[in-house]
Amino acid sequence: MHFIPEDLDNYVVNHSEDEPELLQQLSRETYQKILQPRMLSGHYQGRVLSMISKLINPKNILEIGTYTGYSALCLAEGMKSNGELHTIDIDEELFDFQRRYFDKSTYGKQIFQHLGNALDIIPKLDMVFDLVFIDADKENYSNYFNAIINKLNTGGIILSDNVLWSGKVLDKTFKKDDTSTPALIEYNALLKNDKRIETVLLPIRDGLTISRKM
């Protein structure tokens, strides 16, 4: 989704950092072989994630929702040399695909995959994080926030993707079987009102929120 005219959006992309070759390969193969390739973070948002991570220089990163591994590799670009990135996904069919690209990168030994329900896995991770990226099932965004907020260092950052949901968050008449839109409306209100964090919502692609733990 474009929140600015497409030609201006193209100008923004063309005047941002180039997409690394490995990520170009990952993107091509995702579109060729994997269902719902639009779930990929993609060139521009990937560079945004990379830049944010480089500014934070996190030691430990948690990603909820791996998909084919594109965003994990972007976030890993800013990780400390002794850091770890833990990424959780429920789709076992993508596990080997992710691993192949992780191992092609310079961060392969620092990226740890977890397969299963994130709400079961997060409490078992015996560490605290400097950066968390939430990009999974929208119905559980608030639950993911509550699961990770006490595992986030002071000054740590939570990035939340798809928070504008193609503009549906403005729709007060969503369909009864639409569980994602009301969940995101609730989540956006949670981020705004929770006194433990400060939040800015950016109209990047489908909406990206940056929340900092106070």
Image (cartoon, grey):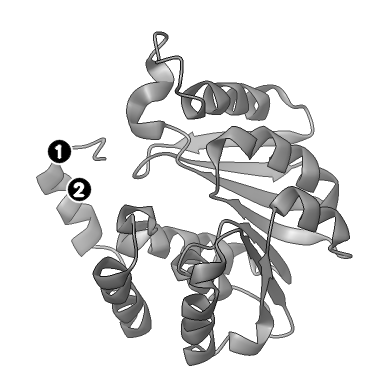
- Amino acid, disc 1: Pro
Along the line of sight, which residue is nearer the eye, 157 or 123?
123
Q: Is residue 6 above or below residue 16?
A: above
Residue 60 picture quarter: bottom right
Element at label 1: loop
Q: Is residue 139 above or below residue 74?
A: above
Q: Position of residue 190 (x, y in %)?
A: 67, 25
Left or right: residue 205 compared with residue 208: left
Element at label 2: helix
Q: Position of residue 177 (x, y in %)?
A: 45, 21
Q: Position of residue 34 (x, y in %)?
A: 34, 66
Residue wearing tag 2: 9
- Which residue is drawn at the image coordinates 48% and 64% (left, top)? 71
Could you say which disc has been placed on residue 70 in the image?
A: none
Q: Is residue 153 above or below residue 139?
A: below
- Which residue is drawn at the image coordinates 33% and 70% (left, top)? 30
